[in-house]
Image (spheres, helix red, strand yellow):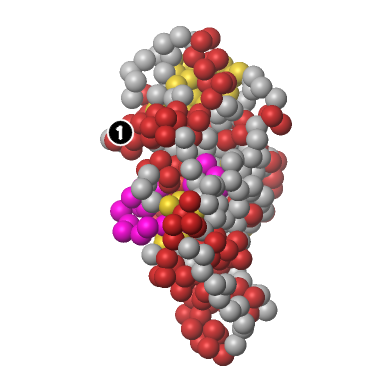
């Protein structure tokens, strides 16, 4: 039900954000148990060119021929090592095209990836994405080895809030349910009643049947949800550093230059940006929109690799690319994925007590019919 007036109360971070440390490095347990492998040859030659030619076909619209001799030896080595290690690679929609199209086994948004991983027989998961995604994969796949190729692949939303902040919110609003966006650490999920994604946030908020819910940490997602429901939302001042940079003025310029263009915005964008869009939805919802409606020209107001990845699958659609890169997503590269498979690092390990409570919050969301 649409609200007549927005009911949002926003609170700020309670602790200095610089105080949040990098995640702990893995203990090296998987490497000790399964062993380190020799680094494969990375030579560009005729054999590599022939073997990787079908993969280059998939990305040739977005990867110039001059770059392929650098990528191809890594692509070949990674695909070989995945078999040797019985590993799969999960790639988020914001990963670069050579990762997304040439080495990934599953692609999608963070929740789709973690759920897909529960269906594989693989022993090892390599996360092409950021740290909270690797943690979510580990929560849903506790018996598998989960690797993040670069520990510094963080997220401005995930680092905007701590478990202590959530405990303070609960003290301030006793009895009010806490809904946490999946873009958070396991520690924050553990303090929550349930998780949500940008595609199911409204349904999750309404699932409690109460008139007030805490929805953290993305203020803009919370504000967008508040336009779709009559439930009062208590929000947090966390922002995605990629989506908060888009402006309504920028979108109006795209519309002025071509009134027929379809503008799709992610709900992590500021409210005035969302107001200019024709459609608002998660990365998966945007991809579904483009694949099913095949607009002539589209602007995807989200991280810029996504347009490259969707373009590879939807020839004939023209993409206008407002390019805001996520610096954290871009820490994951083919060389780092290869090292991850060779040395089995960095292994994601979560304190079992935190993991049990965080898993409950994620599983509650997964079980919710919406
Ligand atoms: S795009 Fe935004 S929400 Fe996604 S990982 Fe980067 S900073 Fe976090």
Look at mark 1 in the image and give the residue it sits on: 368
Q: Is residue 311 visible from the viewing direction of this image?
A: no
Image quadrant where residue 70 sits: bottom right
Element at label 1:
loop
Q: Position of residue 60 (x, y in %)?
A: 57, 75
Q: Nearer the viewer, residue 192 or 264?
A: 192
The x and y percentages for residue 10 are: 59, 19
Q: Determine if the magenta segment contains residue 124.
A: yes
The answer to whether 275 is drawn above or below residue 300 in the figure is above
Q: Residue furthest bottom?
A: 46
Q: Is residue 48 magenta?
A: no
User: Could you tell me residue 146's position as x and y percent?
Assistant: 46, 51
The residue shown at (51%, 64%) is: 36
Taking 244 as reference, is 209 left or right? left
Residue 345 position in % (x across, y down): 54, 55
- Name the residue rendered at 53%, 9% in the picture: 172
In this rendering, the answer to whether 264 lies above or below 174 is below
Q: Which residues are magenta?
A: 114-134
Which image quadrant: the C terminus?
top left
- Residue placed at 60% from the left, 48% from the top? 151
């Amino acid at each position: 039900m649409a609200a007549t007036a927005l009911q949002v109360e926003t609170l700020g971070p309670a602790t200095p954000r610089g105080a949040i440390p990098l995640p702990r490095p893995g203990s090296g347990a998987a490497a000790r148990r399964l062993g380190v492998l020799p680094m494969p040859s990375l030579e560009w030659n005729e054999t590599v060119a022939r073997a990787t030619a079908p993969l280059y076909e998939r990305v040739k619209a977005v990867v110039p021929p001059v770059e392929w001799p650098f990528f191809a030896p890594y692509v070949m080595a990674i695909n070989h090592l995945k078999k040797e290690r019985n590993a799969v690679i999960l790639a988020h929609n914001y990963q670069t095209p050579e990762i997304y199209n040439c080495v990934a086994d599953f692609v999608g948004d963070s929740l789709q990836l973690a759920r897909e991983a529960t269906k594989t027989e693989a022993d090892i998961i390599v996360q092409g994405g950021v740290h909270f995604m690797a943690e979510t994969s580990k929560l849903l796949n506790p018996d598998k080895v989960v690797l993040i190729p670069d520990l510094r692949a963080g997220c401005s939303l995930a680092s905007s809030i701590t478990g202590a902040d959530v405990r303070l919110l609960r003290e301030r609003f006793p009895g009010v349910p806490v809904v946490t966006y999946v873009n958070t650490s396991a520690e924050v999920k553990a303090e929550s009643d349930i998780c949500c994604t940008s595609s199911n946030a409204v349904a999750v908020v309404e699932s409690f049947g109460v008139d007030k819910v805490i929805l953290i940490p993305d203020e803009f997602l919370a504000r967008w949800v508040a336009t779709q429901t009559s439930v009062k939302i208590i929000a947090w001042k966390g922002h995605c550093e990629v989506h908060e940079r888009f402006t309504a003025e920028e979108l109006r310029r795209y519309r002025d230059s071509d009134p027929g263009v379809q503008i799709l915005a992610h709900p992590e964008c500021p409210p005035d940006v969302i107001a200019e869009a024709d459609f608002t939805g998660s990365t998966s919802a945007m991809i579904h929109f483009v694949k099913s409606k095949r607009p002539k020209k589209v602007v995807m107001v989200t991280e810029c690799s996504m347009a490259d990845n969707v373009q590879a699958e939807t020839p004939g659609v023209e993409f206008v690319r407002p390019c805001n890169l996520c610096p954290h997503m871009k820490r994951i590269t083919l060389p780092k994925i290869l090292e991850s498979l060779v040395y089995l690092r960095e292994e994601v390990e979560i304190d079992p007590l935190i993991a049990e409570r965080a898993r409950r919050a994620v599983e509650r969301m997964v079980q919710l019919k919406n």
